[in-house]
Amino acid sequence: MPIRNRSVVLIFILIISLLFLFTPVNRAQNQSQPQKGNQGGMALLEKSLRSRNLIHSRWLLEALDGLPMGGSPMRLNFFLLRRSLAFRPLKDYYLYNRTYSSPRLRDGNRLRERPPRSDKPLISGDNPEIRSRRGLGKLGHLKYVPGVIVVKFREGLTVREVRRTARSLGCRIMRSSRFSDFELIEIPETMTVPQAVKLYSKQPDVVYAEPNYYRYSTFRPSDPYYSYQWHFQQIDIESAWDINFGSDPSVIVAVIDSGVAFENYKVFKQAPDLAGTRFVPGFDFVDDDRHPNDEGTGDGFGHGTWVTGIIAQTTNNGLGVAGIAFNATIMPLRVLDATGSGTSADEAEAIRFAALNGARVINLSLGGEEASQAEHEAVRFAYRNGVVLVAAAGNERDEPEPPSDVCYPARYEEVLAIGATDYLRQRTYYSNGGPGLDVVAPGGDMTVDSNDDGFVDGVLQQSFLAPKYDKFYYFFTSGTSGATPHVAGIVAMLISQYGITDPEVIYDAIRYTAIDQGPPGRDDGYGYGLVNARDLLLGLGINR
């Protein structure tokens, strides 16, 4: 065969292969077989991906549209991660690069050179009261109360005889049941619960002996995609909800970002899964108006909407996903324009606006390389007025010249700096570290599927792709931008639970209750460790 003909044949085979690989799911078939709820669509989506060998390959699922609108058959729109910078439609699939990092903040309207590095640690870093909690068990993982057993003695024994038996075994009666016929027995520290149960069971006057088993609230949100929010499980959020049910409306969390899809205004629509979320008036410092709607960040992704969902997505509504402090109130403040850029001046204005208008928590999922006096003064103003500020550590660790510390405003002493971990609770490849890092929270990793659920290990929430402000999807995305609102959410719950007004008390409690990761004690990769909502809400580490 001539070389020219052979080349034509090879090109033809390549085109046919590509068309076969990316042939979309048969839409007519989907319409003739309506799915029963969201789970059917999820299963069909996963089956479609697996049939094309797209899962566990360099093509990774990024987002999905799981909303059956108006009872119509579910349309399978989703996004795939690709390592190119192209965004182009290919039939019913969209190929899109998404390894989302914190939006860059500019000083004035231009990027400046990297500032001199500072190795000065946070003041709290030398606090001897902030101790490592490596090895401490979590209540949610214990089966029974330590140091106590339940014993039923045979009828007819006197109180004196029961006490005599307890003393002979080195134990004491804690309390007799008020309405039943058993005793709570305190055992010595040298004896384990199983040993005590076995010892008492052998006594002739004992009917039974058993551990005092824990029982837990069974609240799990009804949101159908909640099971894919592995990042909530890693901060022990369900145990925290049993202590504080998602904060309360009096706690206002300001989200300083690209805006939020919180209202129906002109071309903008409210995100369906934010319909039950409470909002107070905010401000748009980019367009200078009172409609801080999310216009996307450069690539069209609704960053502020996604961040807000992590904090306070409408929860237990049978739709989509859950949020952490779902009863808190959100104040949307827009400082990032449609290119994903903002200025330190606008950010400083937004911080002061939040502090002056009742915000108790400020979420800053953004950052820049240089310190700003205007920004720092605004931070100090908010801090002195009892506002907790949490900010992203930054995502430059994998750059050729990674920074030696977290970015600004996270680096300020008055701000809690948040790094990111993956599904394996390991520091992500992109998460900045350094002396300024306080704690880490789940930020996700879009390059792996460590839990084998068929989807990449990103943080899942609802958002959109501009300019389609009325078309919402559920995105898996990663970055310290996503780690930060996890902490903002549990801070909102903590304030609701205890009414704390001193930010430093909250900072110390978060550091103390964090689960140590990496080398023992505080380190520059994990700070004090992975935040734990349950221990924090129990009040551990709070200086009363």
Image: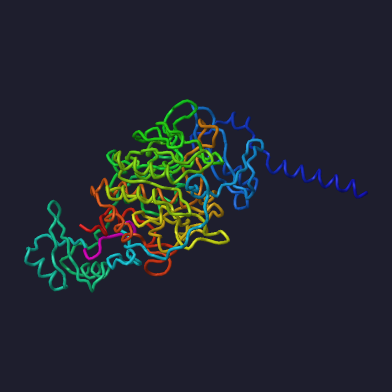
Q: In this view, does 92 lie to the left or right of 372?
A: right
Above or below residue 518? Residue 334 is above
Q: Which residue is drawn at the image coordinates 74% and 45% (left, top)? A: 17
**Residue at (11, 66) in percent of width and height:** 162
Give how far across and how far down residue 215 sits, in percent.
28, 53
Q: What stretch is highlighted in magenta?
A: 140-148
Which quadrant, please, contains the C terminus?
bottom left
Work out whether residue 286 or residue 399 is closer to the camera in this orientation and state it: 286
Q: In this view, does 196 lie to the left or right of 266?
A: left
281 shown above or below 323: above
Q: Is residue 130 shown in magenta?
A: no
* Residue at 62% over, 42% down: 95
Between 334 and 26, the one nearer to me in the picture = 334
Q: Which colour scheme is used?
A: rainbow
Residue at left 30%, top 50%?
A: 383
Is 145 colored magenta in this rendering? Answer: yes
Residue 119 visible within the image:
yes
Residue 393 lies, in percent from the top left, at: 44, 55
* 125 versus 98 height, above or below: below
Residue 224 in sight from this viewpoint: no
How many numbered dots are placed on residues in this image? 0
